[in-house]
Image (cartoon, grey):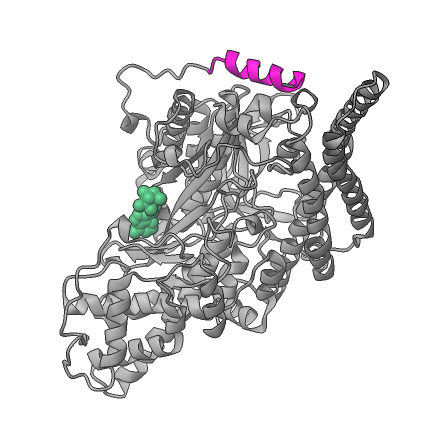
Amino acid sequence: ANKVRLQAMSDVEAYTPPAVTFDPGEEPGEIFGDNVFSLTVMQKRLPKSVYKSVVATIEKSAPLDPLVADAVASAMKDWAMEKGATHYAHVFYPLTGLTAEKHDSFLDPVGDGTAIAEFAGKTLIQGEPDASSFPNGGLRATFEARGYTGWDIQSPAYVLENPNGNTLCIPTIFISMTGEALDHKTPLLRSQQAMSVHAERVLTLFGHTPEKVVSYCGPEQEYFLVDRHFFVARPDLLNAGRTLFGAKPPKGQEFDDHYFGAIPERVLGFMMDTERELFKLGIPAKTRHNEVAPGQFEVAPMFERSNLASDHQQLLMTTFRSIAKKHGMECLFHEKPFAGVNGSGKHVNFSIGNGPQGNLLLPGDTPHENAQFLVFCAAVIRAVHKYGGLLRASVASASNDHRLGANEAPPAIISIFLGDQLADVFDQVAKGGATRSKEKGTLIIGVDTLPDLSKDPGDRNRTSPFAFTGNRFEFRAPGSLQTVAAPMVVINTIMAEALDFCATTLEEAVAAGTDFDEAVQSLLTTIIADHGAVIFNGNGYSDEWQVEAEQRGLKNLRTTVDALPELISEEAIELFSTYAVFNEREMHSRYEVGLEQYILTVGVEANLTLEMGTTIILPAAMRYQTELAANVAALTAAGVEADTSLLTTVSAPIADLRAALAELGEAIAKEHEDESLATATFSRDVVLPAMAAVREAADTLEGLVADDLWSLPTYQEMLYVL
Ligand code: ADP
Ligand code: MG
């Protein structure tokens, strides 16, 4: 093998991962939430009246009273300093999908050259990071690059440990001077509020005195681990997070031995370490198992309120990245780091509920509970059918385009899987609406109970993008790199619209003197008639589904470029402004940032492809070609008949590679400067195919060129040496 790769391999072999040591007798429960300024901590440290006010604020999702803020800030600072914090940071979630932090020292210099520990209530409520370095999609002009952050009191502050000093982290929203959202959290809070209002109206109709309804999210995160020795030897992994070159390994993932197989010891050490860190941060990370591809794994924290789950999800990714480094590995969250190998998603499990009424997507035992469950389920059906395009747009990115519709992830068509039994229930409801007579196989609302709905995982349809799994829906299109906030904003908002529709319809019927059960029956019948086309229990990967979905009028938004315009459709703008989640300017800003990110991602990859193709792959191939030519010349000179077939074989892809590189270079040069839909379309239709042509020639050469000349670590090495 090549020197560089040999060195990497022997370094990998020689590597001893850090020992993961635990205090003997340490129980996971003991460290859970150790670094979190939780309600329990607040209760201990705050005057009773202040504590009560904080709890009330959290319940009401209201902003923190400035009078209370000072007391909270002071207690928070003392607690954090006892935990070794020297700095504090407002943590926010800009539209890049990453996590950003604005750090400040607790120590404010005072006039006489000394410093005092200063952390007032206003510091907690409001920070002022320079917003100009974050994408804002045109909102910048009016807000003069200034942005404000403010604590989301529902998401507790925590201390992040670091060998260079600990930091008190305060999860915040990030808005412009005019109050427009520059982040993913602000709309998430707004959308939860909107959903809650209308869910409560429905619950009231069912005779409850409802408490605040919240949305829950349980994200399943897939990721790859790669040894850092290989990682740093791959400029593409290093700079783009995915391999832009690489032939498929001879041992592919058709070998199912990795899935739920034994976890390599080194990975287990990493997992134990991450779990411990997550526990300290109050993140309930639970399951861990191998995923489908070699080197691929999954972590699924327990579900929480969606804004908290979203913060925790971001923190989980940061934690995984840094702990992987500590263990000599790189954690890849890219949706498709290796072509031809299963990609990584981030399934978003969601449900809605509250304390007294519990999970509203859980089927009940009595006819009355059933009716309520069916209304909430029907709301999901309406929401997903009416706004499937928005759901698709919420998970649109250059990297997720490699995954969706690639026969390993759901297609770009958004449909709902209900399972046979629940689908049958809705069928019966649809039939029963007209007569309300108990004909064979007809379910009567308010009279009948539901059949036991199977929660058997074997019953699950993995090919569906939006699946009912017994007590929740699982949205499977989100990509591993993405924030769960974006899809959750859409889910909450479209649920708000659907529940608003349900509540209004029922209220009107009841006011007109219709029997309530009959009103429910007729509501369900209407929803199934209007939106039943979104229900699909078949194989979402099949070609027939593409055809059938089109006949059903479902959108098939294959790429980000197709999907993003959904954000600025009249319908979307109307929806989001009605429920006060986004105004029109904010929608346009999201759309523009989406385009900008897409163009940027493809641009970086295109330049890397050109550079690696020109400076690494072509030279290796030409050296080999020269060797072969020299061999032919030497043999001919020696009077031996030379076989030139290998030289010919190698020369063809070399010629292809040169031509493809030239074409890619031209495409890059022709790319427009602006970040418009036209530029994004050009990236998709011209740049990406040009990159693919370079890759095809290069991957062919990988199978031909002498191994000692090939310096890029191969798929085989990266995926199997752990
Ligand atoms: P499975 O492999 O069966 O899909 P996992 O245990 O991998 O299940 O993950 C399922 C995810 O769904 C977890 O994050 C879990 O907390 C979450 N979840 C479970 N119940 C609910 C619920 N009612 N609402 C939202 N998320 C839920
Ligand atoms: Mg799972």
How many circles with numbers are drawn on the protein? 0
Image coords of residue 222 (percent x, y): 44, 40
Residue 316, picture quadrant: top left
Relative height, residue 500 to residue 680 (above, below): below
Q: Which quarter is ligand 2 in? A: top left
Q: Residue at x 73, y 54 (%)?
A: 686
Most extreme residue toward the right is 637
Q: Is residue 24 left or right of residue 641?
A: left
Range drawn in magenta? 2-17
Classify the position of the N terminus by image quarter.
top right
Res. 52 in view: no
Image coords of residue 390 (percent x, y): 51, 63
Q: Residue at x 36, y 28 (%)?
A: 34
Main SS of the magenta segment? helix
Image coords of residue 401 (percent x, y): 57, 51
Q: Residue at x 56, y 17 (%)?
A: 9
Relative height, residue 332 to residue 125 (above, below): above
Question: Which residue occupies the foreground of this view, 467 or 701?
Answer: 701
Q: Is residue 13 magenta?
A: yes
Q: Is residue 643 left or right of residue 203?
A: right
Question: Which residue occupies the foreground of this view, 45 or 521?
Answer: 521
Q: Residue at x 72, y 37 (%)?
A: 608
Residue 281, picture quadrant: top left
Question: Which residue occupies the foreground of this view, 12 or 393?
Answer: 12
Res. 25 in view: yes
Relative height, residue 99 to residue 425 (above, below): above
Most extreme residue toward the bottom is 512
